[in-house]
Amino acid sequence: MLLDELVKTTDTVASTRSRLAKVDALADLLRRLEPADIAAAVGLLIARPRQGRVGIGWRGMTAAMGEPAAEPSLTVADLDAALDRLLGTAGAGSAAERAATLRLLTAAATEREQAFIAGVLLGELRTGALEGVLTDAVARAADLPVDAVRRAAMLSGDLGETALLAITGTAAELDAVGLVVGRPVQPMLAATAASATAALEVTGEASVEYKLDGARIQVHRVGDDIRIYTRTLAEVTHRLPEVVEVVRGLPVRDVILDGETLALDEDGGPRPFQETMSRFGADAARATVLHPWFFDVLHIDGRDLLDEPLLTRLGVLERIAPEHRIPGEITADAAVAERVSRDALAAGHEGVVVKAVGSAYAAGRRGSNWIKVKPVLTYDLVVLACEWGSGRRTGLLSNLHLGALDPTGEFGEPGGYVMVGKTFKGLTDALLRWQTERFQELEVRSTAGTVWVEPVTVVEIAIDGVQRSPRYPGGIALRFARVKRYRDDKTAAEADTIQTLRALLRL
């Protein structure tokens, strides 16, 4: 199949808000793919190619971009093969060889295909083909129950291979996909609630557990062979020797554990998230030690536990790893749940996760059996610039550049604004139309992609916190920022300060 057909489908998917229309477009594409292209195409559609990251950054991508091809000729297989070459090129002279491979690829691509390839390689592709939507599309294309496809995908950890099996194999073959120790599964996800009390009203009796500000890990042990995987199922065993040693010391032969790892200070409290992630992402040895904390067990010594109630799984976990269990209490009492929530926050953690005691482990699902509760922080910030959108937002100003007031000039001009992050989250269609008109009126300069504006517009932003970042002059960046509303009642001089935001850092 021509890559152009896949790109056109992503444009169709991005241009509609209808889940049904997205599923229909993707299912039609999947039916037309050659079997050899299915797994690769699925990886491209969810912006996670089967090769993973191939080590191309902005500089390399920009240098490779030349005049685009006039007509489409690249196939899905061509792009997949080029990614294989990029991943497999190493050693002396590899930089030049990789650059040449990338130049040949982009030279054969049309302008629209070049943009798609850049998005895939840089991990910045927004196709609107979220994994859940594509899972539904696989089921539609294969004419199979979506629950069967979803379960096979979660247990195999590979939606691409699941799509290939569903579309070219039989229902029995799909149903035969099972849990395999050593093969990562998609992690179970949590919904959100405003309070522990509200969460408990949904779950009933629950395990109310600390929500740690760490990195999600899934640990597989088969005898003495131990493998550790990230939330996205990338293997990171070599980065976490301290976790390997902990798991090697557990009284089990085979096990799959779900949990978090994070750095602790000398008092046993959590270090800033940025420190954990810096250590977590390091291939070389680092002084910072990461401690594992487990909250679930999916398999033990030949026994699958996925479909067992949480209460049973916690009993197994307490038996094999009592010193490494995430703190929490089982309760149906809202007062107890709120106390655990306060204790978690006082200990420097993010909040709590409230988990129904009778729930199975529904990997890859964000249902109502697990509900996370975190305090929502809101701050009034100033819009410094806005980027033109793409896909469904083409022709609209979308991604906001956000600044905090610097009254003392600690990080710039006194009374100026220090950029602390960007966001396009939380913007309704009405707000998009309004800010597109408004910010063009306030324009002070622009490029093809960005409009800089007079710093006079105040917007209320919800965040999960801040983290240290060298990207911005204030040394911090917002975490999970999203728009709540514009504040017409406030002037830019009344915006929150960079000092207020920096105070959120855990010192």
Image (cartoon, helix red, strand yellow):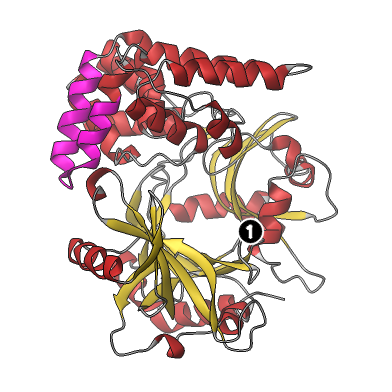
Image coordinates of residue 118 in percent, x first then y, are 46, 32
What is the crowding at mark 1: few (fewer than 14 residues within 10 Å), some, or many (at least 20)?
A: some
Q: Which of 75 and 326 is in front in this view?
A: 75
Q: Quadrant of the N terminus?
A: top left
Instruction: Return the residue nearer the eye: 136 or 178.
Output: 136
Residue 248 visible here = yes
Farthest front residue in view: 445
Q: What residue type is labelled 1?
A: Arg
For the residue pair 40 and 214, the one nearer the viewer reads as 40
Snapshot quadrant of residue 107: top left
Q: Is residue 321 magenta?
A: no
Q: Which x, y percent locates residue 188?
A: 43, 47
Q: Where is residue 456 in the image (x, y as percent from the top left)?
A: 38, 80
Read off the magenta span.
Answer: 7-32
8 falls in the magenta region: yes
Secondary structure of the residue carrying numbered label 1: loop
Front residue (pair 159, 491): 491
Asked if 385 appears above or below 394 in the picture, the reply is: below
- Give the residue drawn at x 29%, y 90%: 489
Residue at 29 percent across and 41 percent down: it is: 128
Magenta region, mostly helix, strand or loop?
A: helix
Quarter of the rendering occupied by the C terminus? bottom right
Residue 378 visible in the shown view:
no
Q: Describe residue 239's horizontal placement relative to residue 395 as left or right.
A: right
Quarter assignment of residue 240 = top right
- Identified at 67% across, 82% down, the residue is 410
Expressed as whole percent of the image width and height from the top left, the position of residue 465 reads 53, 71
Q: Name the residue under label 1.
A: 325
